[in-house]
Image (tube, helix red, strand yellow):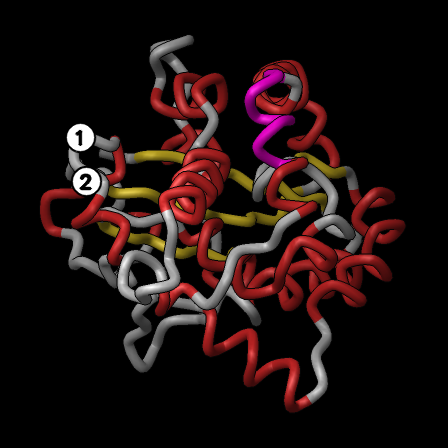
């Protein structure tokens, strides 16, 4: 996994995501195209959270309120996906199953409003790499960088819809003051605390590849949440394309 300082050099990023069967079977689906995505949760003083709010919150709400996004979320909540290792491989995997998988992956892809804002398309003087993530210490962030994959998709599939519903924000995107971080911590702990068997089951459904120094998506979010609550900091979660 690359450091935040290296994200503007995306041509040098290694492929840290494991290609899913859906990518080879999806034909012209967007997920078969080349891209690099980042899911980052960064901690900041409330003053910085306040500065970000007018930019970030409207984009997050615009993505969340899209009718198709709401429909896809409801479908996933009502019908969790099967073991990802059966996708497009099992004889019992139907066309309806394939449609459900693609709906989920579209849901978990970066939202267009947050993506456009983060890339500088909305405001050329603003980008998340330079204006949110730059110069932050490693302990103040959780970062997952993936080629041709989305960390949020693997994370949400691994924990399942019931636990995902406990998390604030929308599909990995949120902006919280320090008070909101403290208030939401119990729900985040419920969502991301596992028994030994539950953790083994979640790990089995996390398809991302990790180097020895990478932090797992099942560990990083809770770590940074607890640290921010202890330190009186707010949090900014952003899932975006960087190339």
Q: In the figure, is residue 58 to the left or right of 10?
A: right
- Does residue 52 appear in the picture of this structure? no
Quadrant containing the N terminus is bottom left
Q: Which mark is residue 28?
A: 1
In the image, 238: left or right of 232? left
Point 65% across, 31% down: residue: 48
Is 179 magenta? The answer is: no
Total labels drawn: 2
Crowd rating for badge 2 (residues with CA inside 10 Å; few <14, some 14–19, many 20+): some
Residue 4 appears anywhere in the view: yes
Name the residue at 65% across, 81% down: 198
Vertical arrangement, residue 12 with respect to residue 200, above or below: above
Looking at the picture, tell me which residue is in the foreground, 27 or 203. Answer: 27
- Circles 1, 2 touching at the beta carbon (< 8 Å): yes
Residue under label 2:
32
User: Can you say which quadrant of the picture contains the C terminus?
Assistant: top left
The reply to whether the magenta stretch includes residue 69 is yes
At mark 2, the secondary structure is helix
Q: Position of residue 102 (x, y in %)?
A: 39, 40
Which secondary structure class fits the magenta region best?
helix
Q: CA distance from mark 1 to mark 2?
A: 7 Å
Which portion, as a residue range, is magenta? 66-73
Helix, strand or loop status at disc 1: loop
Mark 1 or 2: the one toward you: 1
Q: Relative to the observer, which residue lies in front, 79 or 164?
A: 79
Q: Residue furthest left?
A: 11
Residue in the picture at 17% in, 53% down: 13
Give the image location of residue 229, x and y in percent: 79, 58
Task: Pinpoint residue 104: horizontal percent, then vertical percent.
Answer: 48, 42
């Amino acid at each position: 996994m690359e450091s935040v300082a290296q994200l503007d050099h995306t041509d040098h990023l290694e492929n840290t995501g494991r290609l899913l069967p859906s990518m080879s079977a999806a034909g012209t689906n967007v997920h078969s195209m080349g891209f690099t995505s980042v899911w980052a949760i960064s901690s900041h003083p409330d003053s910085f959270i306040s500065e970000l709010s007018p930019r970030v919150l409207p984009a997050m709400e615009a993505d969340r309120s899209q009718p198709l996004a709401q429909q896809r979320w409801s479908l996933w909540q009502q019908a969790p996906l099967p073991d990802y290792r059966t996708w497009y491989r099992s004889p019992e995997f139907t066309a309806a199953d394939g449609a459900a998988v693609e709906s989920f992956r579209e849901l978990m892809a970066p939202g267009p409003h947050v993506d456009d804002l983060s890339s500088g398309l909305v405001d050329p003087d603003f980008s998340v790499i330079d204006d949110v993530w730059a110069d932050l210490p490693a302990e103040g962030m959780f970062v997952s960088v993936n080629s041709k994959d989305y960390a949020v998709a693997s994370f949400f599939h691994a924990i399942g819809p019931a636990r995902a519903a406990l998390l604030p924000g929308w599909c990995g995107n949120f902006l919280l003051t320090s008070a909101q971080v403290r208030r939401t911590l119990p729900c985040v702990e419920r969502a991301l605390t596992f028994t030994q068997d539950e953790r083994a089951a979640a790990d089995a459904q996390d398809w991302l590849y990790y180097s020895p120094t990478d932090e797992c998506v099942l560990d990083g979010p809770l770590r940074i949440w607890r640290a921010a609550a202890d330190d009186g900091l707010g949090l900014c979660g952003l899932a975006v394309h960087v190339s």
